[in-house]
Amino acid sequence: MKFVSTRNRENIVSTGQAILQGISRDGGLFAPCIFPSIGDLESLLELDYREIALFILGSFFPELGMDYLKESIDKAYDDKFQDKEIASLVDVGDMEFLELYHGPTLAFKDMALSILPYLIRGAESIEKIDKEILILTATSGDTGKAALEGFANVKGIKIMVFYPENGVSNIQRLQMITQEGDNTMVVGIKGNFDHAQSGVKAIFNDMDLKELLDRHDYILSSANSINIGRLIPQIVYYIHGYMSMVKRNKIQMGEEINIVVPTGNFGNILAAYYAKNMGLPIGKLICASNENNVLTDFFNKGVYDSRRELLLTSSPSMDILISSNLERLLFHLRGEDDKLISRKMEDLVKRGYYDMEGMDTQDIYGNYAVEEEISWGINHLFQKYGYLVDPHTAVAYMVYRKYLEETKDHRKAIIVSTASPFKFGGKVASSIGIDIRDEDEFDILKSLSEKTGIDMPSSVERLRDKPVRHHSVVDRDEMKAMVMKFLNIGDIYD
Ligand SMILES: *Cc1c(COP(=O)(O)O)cnc(C)c1O
């Protein structure tokens, strides 16, 4: 398999390089040169999650070797997932929720980040690289913890996470700053997620730093969804979810379904688009945003305009104005026109917007939900079906309702459920009528558990007494210095 940069079609790299580099040197993202076909759907019906994972990872990353992949998959998707099926489909009325949050950090990021360390180690081995790897990650809350968990104490790798100081939930912050492992470092940024993300991108493009890292035998890689090694494992659960629907007689084999995805950086929904390109019968991809509705505007008007204030919402993992993975979608939809993509991405940096008028985005529907709607959705699902969702999933549910009302398209749908409600206890509790004034976070979660009869996840319970290990909060322009400090290289006052 080969991967090509979205900004330069002559820049074609191997599986190993695509995974290790994370982002292409020309600023583009690596996209697969072809989409392998999933072939005969029937042959996938009886496979379990791990077997589908082996099939998909083997199709995109055959160079890593089937034995190595199988071993990695068995270690990544083991009993650290509280769900035997890894990602279960749950019937709620005539909707299906695909619960992707039963991994160690209670958000869907675990689906890919529990395997990514193995993919990186494998890539290092086939590329015959014997250097220490520094993983740099910007997080809107969930990627950070899932990456820390995946990479903590992995030999030969160090991991550094930057999160927006005021842009994550209390539980998300606690999960990160109590992280153990000698090879981990967590840093708060005075700014929002976009600042953290652009800061990390700038570090990747900093040639002086690169040289310094070279001299100290470090290479940089990324655990963000710009890394193709994050994206491909996410295809697996769409196939697994589809097969679960067939098995339960919700649909006939081959019947098209719609997929609803609460979207931030556009990684999760892009994986669904990849599954569709491989032959999974998917009708519409429904892209659900919160009030940071740049993508809604884009799919409706053809103009991507980030010139607005980033709002902090109850679904912080979607508080993003620059959705990085959209670049891959545009690349595929515009016939891999690398020149065009480069121009548009340059426009975005220079002018804050670009237009893609006339582009066919018919397969995708975009809409958004505001705070009151999110509360209403959480409460409605709980009162009517006894089903509890987190605010991100509630965004997806509300957008799906709008979609149904507008289109009357009643094909069966999967709504992707991306986080445990206990990660966002305040919003969830207040939405179902619990008085949270003057209550501390853990008391709120206790009330939530009592009222709903759902146990508080043990990993959340344990957070209460865990010591804080990471105290740094810095200005954006200090990120590079923090990297040097962590690695103990260079003169940080240089
Ligand atoms: C990251 C995240 C999202 C957004 O996913 P993208 O792949 O960035 O679009 C949605 N919900 C939760 C809970 C997340 O952690």
Image (cartoon, rainbow, N blue to C red):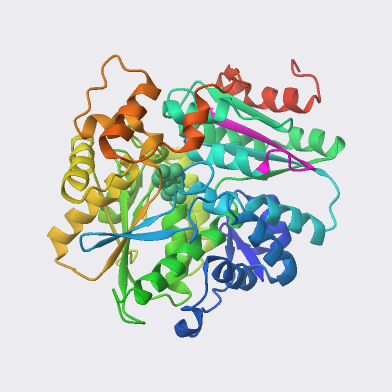
Q: Which of the image's four quarters has the C terminus?
A: top right
In the image, is residue 161 part of the stretch drawn in magenta?
yes
Instruction: Say above or below: 419 vs 76.
Output: above
Estimate the x, y position of residue 350 in percent, counting from the top left: 47, 39
Q: Which of the image's four quarters has the N terminus?
A: bottom right
Estimate the x, y position of residue 307 in percent, counting from the top left: 35, 36
Magenta-highlighted residues: 151-163
With 326 as the anchor, is 377 left or right in this view? left
Q: Which residue is painted at 54% across and 70% down in the image?
A: 52
Estimate the x, y position of residue 235 in percent, counting from the top left: 50, 64
Q: Which residue is painted at 63% across and 65% down in the image?
A: 3
In the image shown, does 22 or 61 lie closer to the viewer? 61
Give residue 31's quadrant in the image: bottom right
Q: Which residue is painted at 57% across and 23% down in the image?
A: 466
Residue 14 visible here? no
Estimate the x, y position of residue 451 in percent, counting from the top left: 26, 34
Q: Which residue is painted at 64% across and 50% down in the image?
A: 26
In the image, is residue 203 part of the stretch drawn in magenta?
no
Residue 196 visible here? yes
